[in-house]
Image (cartoon, rainbow, N blue to C red):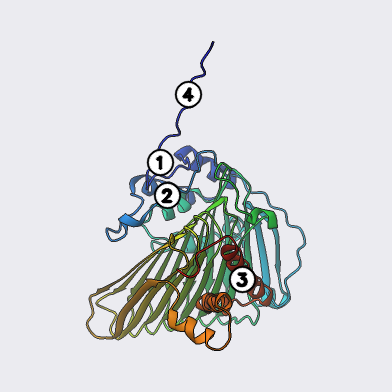
Amino acid sequence: MTVASPRPRPQRQGLTDFTLAVTREDVAAIHAAQGGPDWLLADREAGFDAFEALPAETNDLYTTYIDLRGAHLGETELHRTPVVERSAIALPAGAAGLLVVTDGDLTGAALSREAAAAGVVLTTLADFIAARPDRARALLDNASTLPSNDRFAQLTRAAWSQGVVLDVPAGVQLADPIVIRWVTGEAGRAVIGRTFIALGDGAKVRLLEELVGADASTAIASSGDATQSFLAGTLEVHLGRNASLEVASLQELPETTVAFQHRNAVIGEGATLHWALAQLGSRLVRSRVDNRLEGDRSVVEQVEIVFGGDEQLFDLTSYTRHIGRDTTGNLLSKGALLDRARTYMKGMIVIEKTAVGTDSFLGEFGMNLSKAARSVAIPSLEIDQPDCRRAAHSSSVGPIDETQLFYLESRGIPPDEARKFIVLGFLEPVVARVPVADARDRLRAQLEAKWDAGVGAGADAAA
């Protein structure tokens, strides 16, 4: 009788192990497929060298809270050669522009007549480099465009195969928002892209970024044996003097997708930036936002919300650096967690010596809706300029406030409905900022559906 040999155990994955295989040859192959000038290849190679040299986390405050074990990317392959399908696409109601990237390929783009006549450019990065190489180099060849100490930001710099550019001339103010949609979820595909947003002096734009699955079925949580997909993307923002940008980003990816996001903004004199970021989907999310308030009187307002369930993990980091005089920052992170979900909310405000008159606040708040959920909040301040209007942080983690429950129940609202109202109201600050009505309604519906599914599955909402 022949005895079958035991099945070999899978290799143990460490907390910081990143299992997506990326080589220097891959970087060279992506560049060869894309084409482009020599300086772009040199930029890619410098990014790859940094990716290989850097650890997964460089901040000593945060090294305890990195966990990449949910990312099983050994069978996932890099998307190298994007396909361009310039099919006609209809603008959504109330939108000035739409660009859609599906699993790394351009599948549609449209711009309103008013926006095109004003000189607004919405196109792929490859086309922008070919048409305006000097302008493209000014956007890419910038030391502050991505954090130099972040390993995964440098991976994006090295291995991007698809890119988007929104370039708005000085003085142009669009009444309707621009929509950029990244559709992904094809099993075994790793898509790495970059998005550049540049506003000239006095320009004003609202932007909706959508990160979604290919169809409704991909949003269903699948077994842990399914081959994962990977999406790494950036939003790299440059705001001129007195420019104004409002960004709403909705992450609704399937739970078979791992998502790494980097958002970096350089904010000029008198400019204003509003971030409204919603994290609902994905198995594992690493999100980092870097704000550089370089201009005097510049302003950033940032709200990021998480609604997690099952075993989702959300790793959120925010760095805000005050450099100019009389700058203002208001930053808020909120997480509501069901089941065994986890969220790490980590923030750092840096006030440099030049930043006289700074007003900055950082708040991080977690709401655990089951006994197995876990939230961690680590707000931090680094102050080199004592002459500040305000420099403060606040944090709390806990269950639903019993006094709020008592108030609603005393007015005849059933306990389950009261909890639902409190949780959805906790997340509303981002929902209300979504500039397209259909997307705003869809987000509210998905938040309600996630609550109903979590409670229906037996989540201990009374924890």
Secondary structure at numbered mark 1: loop
- Rate crowding at label 4 as few (under 14), some (14 to 19) or many (20 or more) other CA atoms within 10 Å: few
Q: Is residue 429 above or below residue 78?
A: below
As drawn, the label of residue 448 is 3
Q: Position of residue 243 (x, y in %)?
A: 50, 80
Callouts 3 and 2 close, C-beta under 8 Å: no
Quadrant that contains the N terminus? top right
Specify whether 278 is left or right of 119. left
Q: Is residue 242 visible?
A: no
- Rate crowding at label 2 as few (under 14), some (14 to 19) or many (20 or more) other CA atoms within 10 Å: many
Q: Given this view, does label 4 or label 2 mark the residue nearer the observer?
A: 4
| Disc 2: which residue | 68
Q: Looking at the image, is mark 4 or mark 3 earlier in the sequence?
A: 4
Callouts 4 and 3 close, C-beta under 8 Å: no
Q: Position of residue 226 (x, y in %)?
A: 58, 43
Callouts 2 and 1 close, C-beta under 8 Å: yes
Specify whether 147 is left or right of 435. left
Q: Is residue 47 above or below residue 381?
A: above
Q: Is residue 118 visible?
A: yes
